[in-house]
Image (cartoon, rainbow, N blue to C red):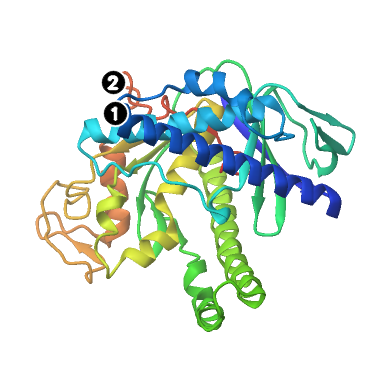
Amino acid sequence: MRKSYKFRLYPTKEQELVLVKTLDVCRYIYNEFLADRRNAYDRCNQGLTTFDQITQVKYLEFNTEVFSQIKQDILRRLGKSFDAFFRRCRSGETPGYPRFKGKDRYNSFTCPQSGFKIEGTKLKLSKIGGIKIKQHREIEGKIKTCSIKHETDQWYAVFSVDTGANPEKVNPNTSIGIDVGLNSCVTLSNGEQYDSPTYFRKSERSLAVQQKRLSKKKKGSVNRLKQKTKVVKIHGKIHNQRIDFNHKLSRILVNRFDRIVFEDLSIKNMVKNHHFAKSIHDVAWGQLIQMAKSKAEEAGKYVELVNPYNTSQKCSSCGNIVKKGLSVRVHRCQECGLELDRDVNAAINILNLSTVGTTEGACGVTDIGLGYEAGSHLF
């Protein structure tokens, strides 16, 4: 099982210049070899493989002063972009050809095997030196890769760790069904509700002010760059608040219950409705479910996704279909007389659809490779 640890870095001004230069070189290599692939297709109608390009990276015309394995990982990243492109072509999705990276679109590099080492309070990187690191917890498992990421004006080290075999599954003694929504972020089948934090809505006014100021700055000017940083910081704060909330909520759920049942929602289709798109993105249901999956896998517990069809309309007591619009917040069944909150009724229906314990392969977490841990996130 793989999981990630994320720690803050505090480089000196000289080290930050070296890190920025390394990112620029990595971006240059990425764009150069992307151009090579495009030219090979245009001229010869024949593609280049990742292996072909890795063997050529050492023949670059200039001294990059970047660790060799970092350069190889850049080409593997490029290869994954093309693999994803061809996979989308085969599946009939909108392809999205790999694009050249501008300065604001390439913010990380990876040491895949070696070239990094933690010694005390310093992270030593090959050809860069020792950088102060805030390691707020111990790393459990074998470190496989180290990625350096630049977010606005902050630097982070993200370690991918192999923690060994998956833990044994527990006997699901306690189960809960969860209905996600906009009024309440989640509603449990036992009647508990957790309100949506709506961090974006709360910061929307200040964000609009900063974006309006940004639109008035002259393109390419220093003032525009400074104002752009202010806008990015607001987005970053919203992002961190949302991740923190979902980490804490998913931890509460996994600690309390052995089996958690969510709806298998098609969020990409739901956000096509412009009336609800902003609110759906703000509550981040997909992120919550993903975090619950990874934490459940680590604890040997279960997270299952079930078909959401008619879970809001069906009576959880007698099975009768009670049609109601979104504005109707109370479920009232004319057949059995059941009356309760519509979200609680839906959560009970979701729990009743669970197959964990009766059907093999229903745990819904076997496909999770990299996990989350409270206080850190993947990039």
**What crowding class fits label 2: few (fewer than 14 Cα within 10 Å), some (14-19), or many (20 or more)?**
few
Residue 374's disc number? none
Relative to 72, 12 lies left or right: right
* Residue situated furthest right in the rendering: 120
Between 303 and 201, the residue placed more toward the observer is 201
Residue hosting label 1:
355
Up the image or down, 342 lies above or below 291; here it is: below
Q: Are marks 1 and 2 in contact (CB under 8 Å)?
A: yes
Count the marks.
2
Asked if one can make out residue 65 in the rendered structure from this viewpoint, the answer is yes
* Percent of width and height locating residue 196: 46, 63
Identify the residue shown where x is 25% and y is 37%: 353
Q: Secondary structure at mark 2?
A: loop
Quarter of the image with the C terminus is top right
**What crowding class fits label 1: few (fewer than 14 Cα within 10 Å), some (14-19), or many (20 or more)?**
some
* Percent of width and height locating residue 50: 47, 23
Residue type, numbered disc 2: Thr
Residue hosting label 2:
359
Quarter of the image with the N terminus is top right
Asked if one can make out residue 145 in the rendered structure from this viewpoint, the answer is no
Between 90 and 200, the residue placed more toward the observer is 90
Q: Secondary structure at mark 1?
A: loop
Up the image or down, 152 lies above or below 292; here it is: below
